[in-house]
Structures are given as structure tokens and as C-alpha cells.
Amino acid sequence: MKKVTEQAIAFAPATIGNVGVGFDVLGLAVDSIGDQVTVKKTETGDIRIKKITGIDNLPLDPLKNTATVGLIQLCKDLNLPFGFEVEIKKGIPLGSGMGGSASSAVAAIVAANSLLSKSLTKSDMMKYALMGEAIATGSIHGDNVAPCLFGGLTLVQSLDPLHVISIPIPKDLFFVLVHPGFRLDTKAAREILKPHIDLKDYVKQTANLAGFIAGCFIKDFEVLKNSLSDILIEPQRAHLIEGFQKIKGSALDNGALGCSISGAGPTVFAVTKGKSTANKVKNAMVVAFKNAKAPKITSWITQSSSKGAHII
Ligand code: HSE
């Protein structure tokens, strides 16, 4: 039996869903950006949200908030004699494509888990966090929750049964994220996608996904560069981001190995070898976003966070 405490705070990282080539299956946790959730045991047995800071207009109703939906099910499944009071500190902009809903859901489960007398498995934690993610995005996909929980770059090979594979990342790989300051609704960005794809596109995208993963294993930046191209989803969503082709062009012209939409957008990410190239790419992308009249640009240079969500 582990020592039981009354309150825990967890940090969960932001994520780049899809990483361009792996729609709904590939995701990467980034360092330094993320959500923080405090979970306190309550004697009353209910689940309630005390406060949300960092973002306005998020639902305080526990049945509607991504952080609490999984906790409600957890309490039911384990027949817990106590409930949880939750405080959410959002560090990830809402509707940004940086995995904010997954991050809050994962942080809440990780914090709650540390208050249980018997720890949950990662697989159980993923199941409860996915319930929260589903409320926010309208579908169950693990490309944000998995890297958020496990850290690093992950491939969700199967959701049921859960098979998550961690993929090594070359240490010189940097990720530039530029958020234009407007929101895109993931549900809406999924609804515009065609339900069927051409066989030749399937072949090309499979080759790109396999090439990207192989490039990570063999640490070959040329292979990464040749593979980092999303020919399926990006062309269908690009019009949602004003000036996308020019923004992507500015990243590639300045040495990025690849550039695409983070998750469902509107954040755009670029991958570079080395930090100085990341700086050049970031500056160029910011100028391109300004030219496209983005309302409020925020940019980051990050590396992959090898640590997933954790207690702080
Ligand atoms: N894989 C998801 C998508 C990520 O692209 O719709 C957003 O949650």
C-alpha cells in the first residue's frame, strides 16, 4: 500500500498531435508548455471544479469539462468513498491545436491517481483521460493523450487493447510552434475531412509515416526531411489558417525539415535540426503570420519532453 495524501498537483505537457504524417496516431510532447491541475480529496464524494485560471469561458460543470469527466468515471468504477475538488491552471491556449483538452484531462488523472491507495496502470489512466478528450473533441483519438501521459514521441498502434510505442527522437531535433491567436474548434476541423482517401494517397502517406519513424530510429535528418509531408489532412485544413502556404514556405525556405499543422490547428509547427535554425524559422514564420494578419501571435522553440505528465 502506498502512502495516501490529500492533495496533489500535476503538470501535463502540450502536444503536437499528428506530427503531420500520423493523423490520430502519432504525437509529440513538448517541453515547458502545459496545463497544471490540483486535485484535492473531498469527503462529500462529489466531483467539483473550484477554479479555472489562465483561460476564460471554460465550463465549470464537471460533466462538461475535459479534466473532470474521467474523474467521475474513475470514482464510479473504483467505488471510492471520497470525491475530488479540482483546480485548473491553463497554460495551453484554448482551441490552439496544442492538445489543451488532453493535457487537462491527463493532469487531472495523474494528480488523482497519486491520491489513491492503489495506483492505476498507465493504460487505465489513458482510458480515463481519453474520456475527457472525447468530450472536447467529439471523438476518441490518442495522439495527444498518449504523448502527454508517456512523454516523448508516441505512436498509438491500437487504442483497444492499448498499444503505445515510444519512438526515440534525435537530440538535435527542435520544434517551433507558432500560434496565431484565434481558436479552431477540433470537432469542426474534423467534420470537414473527407471520409475516404485515394489508394495512391494512402500509399504515399504510409511511406511518409514509416519514413519519419525510421528517420527517428536511424537519426537521419535527410530521411526526416523527405518524409515530413502530410498529403492527406493538411491540404483539407490549410484554408482554415489564413496564409498557411506562405507560412509553411517561410519555414522551409529558412531550413526547416518540415512544417505542418499542429493537431487540428491553428498552431503551425516546424521541425528543425539545431536551435539556431529553429530561431531563424520561428522569426520567418512570425513575419509570415503577421503578413497574414494573425490577431495575436505567440511562438515557442521547444524540444520534446521526455517526461510525460508528472506530479510537481
Ligand atoms: N488528431 C486530431 C486531429 C488532433 O487532427 O483532429 C486534434 O485533437
Image (cartoon, rainbow, N blue to C red):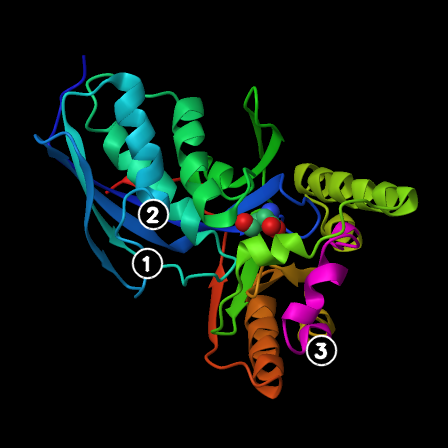
What residue sits 88% from the left and 46% below the top? 198
The question of residue 135 being in magenta is answered with no
Q: Is residue 201 above or below residue 239?
A: above
Of helix, strand and loop, which one carries label 1? loop
**Gap between marks 3 and 2, in whole Å?**
36 Å
The question of residue 233 being in magenta is answered with yes
Q: Nearer the viewer, residue 278 or 1?
A: 1
User: Is residue 271 visible to us here?
Assistant: yes
What residue sits 37% from the left and 45% below the top? 66
| Quarter that holds the N terminus | top left
Q: Mark 3 points at which residue?
A: 246
Q: Which amino acid does label 2 sit on?
A: Asn
Tell me whether circle 1 and circle 2 mark residues in contact (CB < 8 Å): yes
| Quarter that holds the C terminus | top left
State left or right for residue 199 relative to residue 22. right
Mark linked to residue 261: none
Q: What residue type is labelled 1?
A: Leu
Q: Nearer the viewer, residue 137 or 220?
A: 137
User: Residue 157 at what x, y percent from top left?
Assistant: 64, 29
Q: Which amino acid does label 3 sit on?
A: Lys
User: Is residue 262 visible to us here?
Assistant: no
State left or right for residue 131 relative to residue 242. left
Q: Mark 1 points at which residue?
A: 58
Instruction: Please identify the residue farthest to the left as the structure is shown.
Output: 43
Residue bounds of the magenta highlight: 227-246
Mark linked to residue 65: 2
